[in-house]
Amino acid sequence: MESDSPPAPAPGGAGVAPQPVVGKTVPCLQSADHDDLDKHVAAGRFFWLDLEDPNDEQLQLLGSKLGLHPLTVDDARSFHERPKIEEFETYVYMVLYGVDPGATSGTPLLREVHMAISGAYVVTIHHGAINALTELRERTAKTPVRTEQFMIYKVLDAVVSTYFPVLQKMDDDIDAIEEAIIASPDEASLKQIFSMKRDLVDIRRVVTPLRDVFARDAERIADLPGMEADDRAYFRDVYDSLIRISDLVDSYRDLLSGATDMYLSTVANRQGEVGKQLAIIATIFLPLSFLTGFWGQNFSFLTGHIIDNNWTFFVLGIGLLVASVGALWIFFRRKRWI
């Protein structure tokens, strides 16, 4: 008699269910003076501290609790720094930049983030809320991560990934600008081109050195004391993203330069068309003005011997005007000016 139960899978066979990856829950803190920070530091538990607009007192307190170098505390106070990685005995201090996807033209686009990274913690310091980090905190509170390196990678990736929606929007805007220039070039399109060029210059100014920093020093993070061994491809992935961002910035700068040339060329062509039309009108009226001026002088020979019948008014007066216009029209058509 056959059994209704399914056969047991062979050991090591394809029917064996994969074992779930065992991870660790990373506490996400938002205050340096919170009691939980002291507990995590004392227990040696890895945590993420995300500080938004900290004051000098909070930074001093953070430095004393984590044993940060005084130069690190000073750097955390001063923003508008160049992307960099500084290596200390037990941690590295990093300055990187993201962008604000919700920024409008004329408002600050770049978002500076300072990070202190060690085998026991990752600290992010920034001015104002950064949606990418806020969303990452919410996800991290619910989803365990495998290792400290993976958590650090997620923070870095969250900041770097903010460039892609902004650049995608720029790509769409460039297409719209080109279509608008072809349809009807105006100063609004030119102003938008210059505004986007300034944004791309700002992005390139921070992405290029940040890319070089990751190419040279990022993998040093894996060598920090207390850092669990993990795949170093995480940091290479961030480096690849920065290369892609840098390439997109250069491509969009070229496209905007092309759009500027298209605008100038289109405006020049339109001005040439207007000038040609005005020249045609002036040329048409030139013989008319000559003829009406000549016949309007009223010399006695003209009035006594030539303009002495009604037919002369129609043939010589009106007829010559019509003939001159017709002759010019034929000439312009042969030259393909009209």
Image (tube, rainbow, N blue to C red):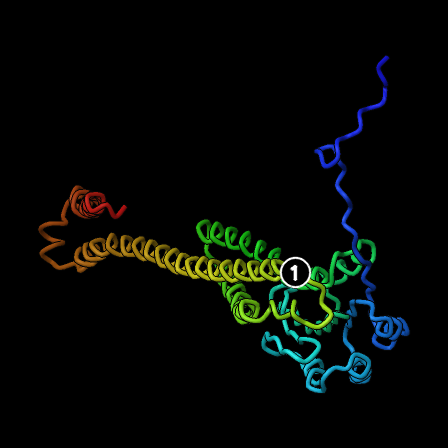
Which quarter of the rendered picture does the N terminus lie within? top right
Q: Position of residue 48 (x, y in %)?
A: 78, 67
Q: Residue at x 8, y 51 (%)?
A: 305
Q: Position of residue 101 (x, y in %)?
A: 65, 60
Q: Give the mark count.
A: 1
Residue 108 in view (yes/no): no
Q: Position of residue 125 (x, y in %)?
A: 73, 73
Q: Residue at x 29, y 53 (%)?
A: 281
Tell me the residue that label 1 is attached to. Answer: 157
Residue 334 in view (yes/no): yes
Instruction: Name the residue nearer the viewer: 181 or 106.
Output: 106
| SS at badge 1 | helix
Q: Residue at x 74, y 82 (%)?
A: 68
Of all residues, the one furthest to the top in this rendering is 1
Instruction: Name the residue nearer the viewer: 249 or 267.
Output: 249
172 sits left or right of 38 in the view? left
Vertical arrangement, residue 93 with respect to residue 160, above or below:
below
